[in-house]
Every structure is written in C-alpha cells, then in structure tokens.
Amino acid sequence: MDPILVTGATGNVGRQVVRQLTAAGLPVRALTRDPDTARLPDTVAALRGDLADPDSLDQVLHGVGAVFLVWPFGHADGAAAAVDAIARHARRVVYLSSLGAATADDPISRMHNELERLIESTDLRWTHLRPGGFATNTLSWAAQVRAGDEVRGPYADLSRPLVHEADLATVAVRALTSDAHHGARYPLTGPAHLTQAEQVATIGDVLGRPLRYVETDRAESYRGMVGAGWPPDTADAVLDAWYAMRERPEPVLDTVAAVTGRPARTYRDWVVDHAADFTA
C-alpha cells in the first residue's frame, strides 16, 4: 500500500490517526514543521513541510496514496495551493472539517466550507469528517482544575455531545483505507449531551475530587478568551454560537457507530483517558 500522509500529526486527532494507522501495520508519513520535536513512532517517516508553504509539499507528497488533512489556520488563505499540491500526488483525501460547515454561519465554519469546496473541485476521492464539539477542548480547564475546585467559564447549561478524538481517528482511518467512503460528509458527535457543569462534575468524579462550574458573564468570558489568544472577532462569534446552542443544541448522532461498528466513546471514557492531563 502507498504511504498515507498525516497532516496535523502532532495534534490531538492527528496523533490518534498516526497511532491507529501504525497499529494496523500501514506505512505512514507525517508532515511537521520540526521533525526533531514531533515525538512520533520510529516507524513513521516524519518529514519537514508546511501547508502554508506549497513549495515544501511536493517532496513530502511524492508517492503517497491518501492524505489526512487538518487545516491549522483560522482562514482559507493559501488553501487552494495546498489542495492543488495534494491533488497532484494523492488519490484520496480525508478532511477534518466541522459540523458547522453545513451552514457556514460563523467565520470558522465558513473557512471549513471553503476547504470542502476546494477539495470537491479536484479529482480527489474525498471524505469530509464534520465533528461537533471536541472533548479535547475541555483540556482548556486543566490549569483551573490543578489550581482549585472551581472551573470558571460561560454558559454552565451549554449542553453538547462531545466527541472523543479516538473515534474521529477511527472514522478517518476507515475513510483513508477504503473507497467506500468517497463523497461522504460524516457528521460526528459523542453519544450523549452533557452540560458544561456536568462535564466538570465528571472530571471531578474521575479524579476523586469535588469540582464545580462557576458561570461567568459574557464580558468576563470574552476578556478571558482574548487574553488567552483568541482573535476578538472569533471570540465574539464563538460566544454567539455557544449562546445559540443553549436553545438549539447539536444533535446526538450515531455516525461513529454506523461507520466503525462500535458505539462512540463517552465523555467519561475521554476523561479517564486524559486524567493525567488534569493533574500533571
């Protein structure tokens, strides 16, 4: 089998894709800006390159059969050149998109929608993964969990069916290794809704500590997000989207089970897998 190129290989989902492909004995290449610090398995060919620099991609892509594409920027600038480079070499691409790409009603969703359209305009055999909320995003609470018994943030009653990155990777591996998923746009969620207050309580239960969620108002939440590096427009858009989700929550979908043949992992499963990240 031709090598499979994984972009975003040092991120949460990309590492899982690499792990599952190598466990299956498949040849894997990883695109990384710094192979020396990538900490990937010895069997993985970690190659230097950058999606923002199309000239760096041809050598990395030469001979690959499929690409797992994570677009790491908050805009689509330069995406056309990167997608063209992939299309010159590979036969298949699996793109990590977003559930919001279907409606494209915020800046991040519009970016994902644009990437999907660029991919679909090529001759590539494509699959789009459209996850809702990532369980890994709750790692943003880790510093607060280590510091005390409260987690502060907006909208305690915001309820989402967060998805485990291992489930995203399993779906990705199926699509990377079979033409049966060509043309699919897979909406992917976890198996049940939990409010943010319930998520924090779950973390506490797994860690054996009482934790509670303290709701902050929008102004404080906005200042905290911008202070943490969020672009102001994106922070506003995300807070708007979260507020709207309180009235119109994301649906719970069974796509993970339909594609993989096993139920999606629960948020508790995810916390167990990441307990050390909240204590180290």
Image (tube, rainbow, N blue to C red):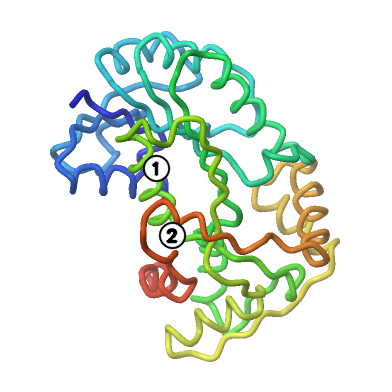
Quarter occupied by the N terminus: top left
Q: Nearer the viewer, residue 125 or 142?
A: 125
Give the image location of residue 39, x and y in percent: 25, 44
Q: Earlier in the sequence, mark 1 or mark 2?
A: 1
Residue behind mark 2: 257
Which label sits on residue 236?
none
Q: Nearer the viewer, residue 179 or 129?
A: 179
Give the image location of residue 77, x and y in percent: 63, 19
- Secondary structure under the numbered disc 2 in the rendered image: helix
Identified at 36% across, 31% down, the residue is: 179
**In the depicted structure, whether residue 147 falls above or below residue 60:** below
The amino acid on which the numbered mark 1 sits, given as a three-letter code, is Ala
**In the depicted structure, whether residue 6 falls above or below residue 212:** above
Give the image location of residue 269, x and y in percent: 41, 73
Examine the image and state in which quarter residue 176 appears: top left
The amino acid on which the numbered mark 2 sits, given as a three-letter code, is Ala
Which label sits on residue 172?
1
